Amino acid sequence: MAKYIEAKCRICRREGCKLFLKGDRCFTDKCAHERRPYAPGQHGRARKKVSDYAVQLREKQKTRRAYGMLERQFRGYFEKADMKKGVTGTNLLVMLECRLDNVVYRLGFANSRNQARQLVRHGIFTLNGHKVTIPSLQVSVGDTVELPEKNRKIPILAQIQEVIARRGCPVWLEIDGPAFKGSVKAMPQRDDIQFPVNEQLIVELYSK
């Protein structure tokens, strides 16, 4: 599978907003987007005439990169969202939020979605008491994500309690920090998804 191996801070600068791809670094003065809030490259500061297509493309790229997916997988999510009842854009964002790796990240068990995805692939967490290794698994209301006691001493998870306390938890999730356990209280609504994206532009792009 293809993998982006270059500096992740370039992605935030290119998309013009923080995507929190570097975890705690994004909250410090070292954040590249804060220090250089313009696109990377020789012509990053140049004023450019932006077409409607370019605006739509940037919204799609921003969302896809924030959730760490390639184009084919992201397009698949859109097609599934389009077949569901309701607003296609909202359906798309809800499906992305309900991915297991995103839930692990939202609960504070990982510093970034990329780290959450890696931890899930290694079978570090359990879902409803069963070991899982599929980051794209869709969670449902009532599902419980837990970090087993035997995995709590992993060095990369040493500061997990501090991350949980600092970041907080979305209203559609419930976290029990001392027990290293989180659960899905309800499906996320559009107002619960605090991500700076205009999903309608993505719908317009794929509908052409």
Image (spheres, grey):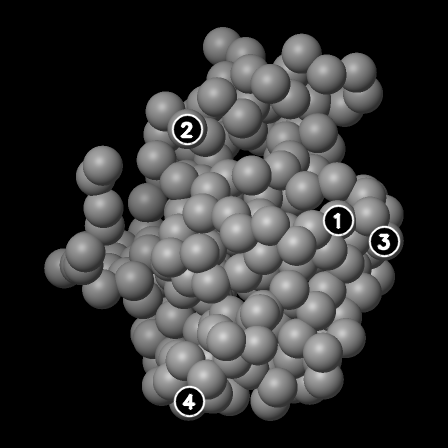
Q: CA distance from mark 1 to mark 2?
A: 24 Å
Q: How many marks?
A: 4
Q: Is residue 159 above or below residue 73?
A: below
Residue at 51% across, 88% down: 159
Q: Is residue 90 above or below residue 148?
A: above
Q: Is residue 26 above or below residue 126?
A: below
Tag shown at residue 208 = none
Q: At numbered mark 3, what does the secondary structure look like: helix, strand or loop? A: loop
Q: Residue furthest left?
A: 42
Residue at 23% across, 50% down: 4
The residue type indicated by label 4 comes to: Asp
Q: Earlier in the sequence, mark 4 or mark 3?
A: 4
Q: At numbered mark 1, what does the secondary structure look like: helix, strand or loop? A: loop
Q: Which residue is mark 1?
A: 143
Position of residue 9 in the picture relative to residue 137 (left or right): left
Asked whether 58 or 77 is in front, the reply is 77
Q: Which residue is mark 2?
A: 73
Mark 1 vs mark 3, foreground winner is 1
Residue 204 position, x and y percent, is 57, 20
Q: Which residue is mark 4?
A: 29
Q: Which residue is mark 3?
A: 185
The residue type indicated by label 2 comes to: Gln
